[in-house]
Amino acid sequence: MSDYQYPVNDILFSLLSIADINKLSPYLEEPVDQELLEAILGEAGKLSEQVIAPINASGDSEGSRVENGEVIEAKGFKEAFKAYTDGGWVGLSGDPEYGGQGLPSFIATAVNEGVQSANLAFSLCPLLSHGAIEAISHHASDELKSQYLPKMLSGEWAGTMNLTEPSAGSDLAAIACKAIPDGDAYRIKGQKIYITWGDHQMSDNIIHLVLARLPDAPEGVKGISLFLAPKFLLDDAGEPSQRNDVQVVSVEHKLGIHASPTCVMSFGENEGALGYLVGEKHQGLKAMFTMMNNARQGVGLQGLAIAERAYQQALAYAKERKQGMKADRSGKAAIIEHPDVLRMLMTMKSQIDAMRSLVYVAAVENDLSHIADGEVKQKAVARTALYTPIVKGWITEQAQEITSLAIQVHGGMGFIEETGVAQHARDARILPIYEGTNGIQAIDLIGRKLYADKGAAMQDLLAEMGADLDQWKADNFNAPLEKLENALEQAKQATDFCLAAMQKDSTLGTGSAYAYMMLMGYVVGAWLQIKALAASQQDAQMGNQQKQSWCQSVVFYCDHILPRASAFYQAIESGHESVEVLNETSFAR
């Protein structure tokens, strides 16, 4: 089992040369220079490699358990969480008014890549806390902010989000959890399931954000409100005191992320869990989407992170494992010398390179959407909305292939748990499911993001890709430009087709949604790969070997990965009718 190495050089290259963090400088009081960024990421790498990664396999073996109504996390997790919080990593991009450091969120994204690669199960706890902080920051009253944000940003208190119920999964309109007024607060009664890190002993308090219905709530999603219900109520000094009426019922036995307790939570088995309204009545879904959109890009980052971890392990194994003879028959060959193993490794690497570029391009756009103004802000808001379902959906789909290939590179040993590579595939499998399944992400892309503005934001993105392509051609840039040009034309035609299909029937039109999301992921990935190639050739600090590696990654991607976009285009153009005629009788036997 190989040790994890934080890919700091690749991350810095993605941020500086592809995502172009300098575009944020006009809107920052103190622009982030390369020296500061390198210092932060250097410390983040040490934390990930030396503190969090070593407890990944042991946490997977041990898991979590419930004792006396409390969740006990795996050994070493509490100490690692303390190191994480003591380092100030929770509040990196938080509001300075409440103790945060106020840095752009792309830095937190870069830090989180390392934490998530090192230990995906561990990383889910701060991920949920970051989402809760975001929702409270944007929607809670000043009183709630002052009471809860300082301790959450310091990491003393953790956060969760409680959406799903036994009868309400992705369909939040079916939520039955109740919130009954009680003075200035509310008494919450109901059960929530699949609550990530719903209970643990790593922090002094856990702040639950809960979707529930008021007694006068209208039916459907327009009747959902958001409430803050702490595990421990606060005393007059603002410190945890009396236990709230919130209990963990059980933790689920799962395929992967064993060390992350996925809890069944009960609110109000007795007098009712005391909760406080966040935002306006019946506007809870709007507030929760702030948290969910934050988490969706975070899940895409997890897809990149677990793919990177699996790739590192496969690469190390391929260099060490001897199997078969060298080409000159002079002795045993390491399997990395075999062409098919090289194909698998570059299939992993080239996609990871594209995935990382997209993650950081989207992260910088997200920052821009918050701090810019005027037309720049409007464009960044639209672009962030467009990128989010692709980041979450396309990247987590790629993670399935990459973690599976890591097992394949190991051969039979990959199927043996002791090598540790199987854990990455098991852990990655949840990613296309949670924070909205990838089918929901695809429908979000084709419906809320494409059809809602009649394709304006997508046309803007396609135009930017086209402008870059024209510039590269004018510069006689040596890259697979024709292949990108053909794929871009198919993306434009697919966009027009999907818009027409949605105009005709917005329900049947979503039959092409998944294919469209994947098509756009591959095309955007190719665009960013060629942009990376152009940047690498102009990077004076990059060595010739690194430049050659980038060149081979980009050419391989355009030769072997980008053609998948054409298959999805064909599925959209000529396969929509075979989807539209499907119904339950189609599966008779």
Image (cartoon, rainbow, N blue to C red):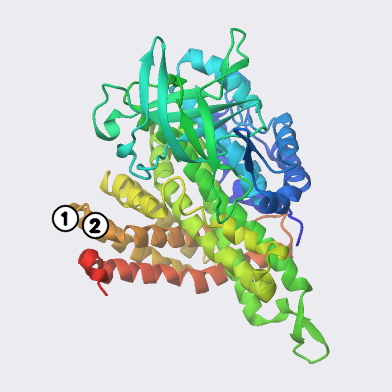
Write the residue at 63% across / 29% down: 91
As drawn, which residue projects farthest toward the right?
A: 330
As drawn, which residue projects farthest toward the top?
A: 236
Q: Are marks 2 and 1 in contact (CB under 8 Å)?
A: yes
518 left or right of 252? left
Residue at disc 1, secondary structure: helix
Instruction: Measuring from the top left, give residue 564's x and y in whole percent.
Output: 43, 70
* Amino acid type indicated by mark 2: Gly
How many residues crowd mark 1 within 10 Å: few (<14), some (14–19), many (20+)? few
Give whichever of discs 2 and 1 has the lower sequence position: 1
Write the residue at 47% across / 54% down: 432
- The foreground one among 259 and 391 is 259
- Point out the image quarter for the N terminus: bottom right
Q: Which mark is residue 344?
A: none
Q: Which residue is mark 1?
A: 504
- The foreground one among 254 and 22 is 254
69 left or right of 36? left
- Point out the image quarter for the C terminus: bottom left
Instruction: Measuring from the top left, give residue 120's x and y in whole percent.
Output: 62, 49
Write the residue at 67% across / 33% down: 89
Disc 2 and disc 1: Cα gap in Å? 8 Å
* Amino acid type indicated by mark 1: Lys
- Name above or below for residue 551 compared with residue 197: below
How many residues crowd mark 2 within 10 Å: few (<14), some (14–19), many (20+)? many
- Name above or below for residue 537 compared with residue 483: above
Write the residue at 64% across / 34% down: 32
Q: Which residue is mark 2?
A: 509
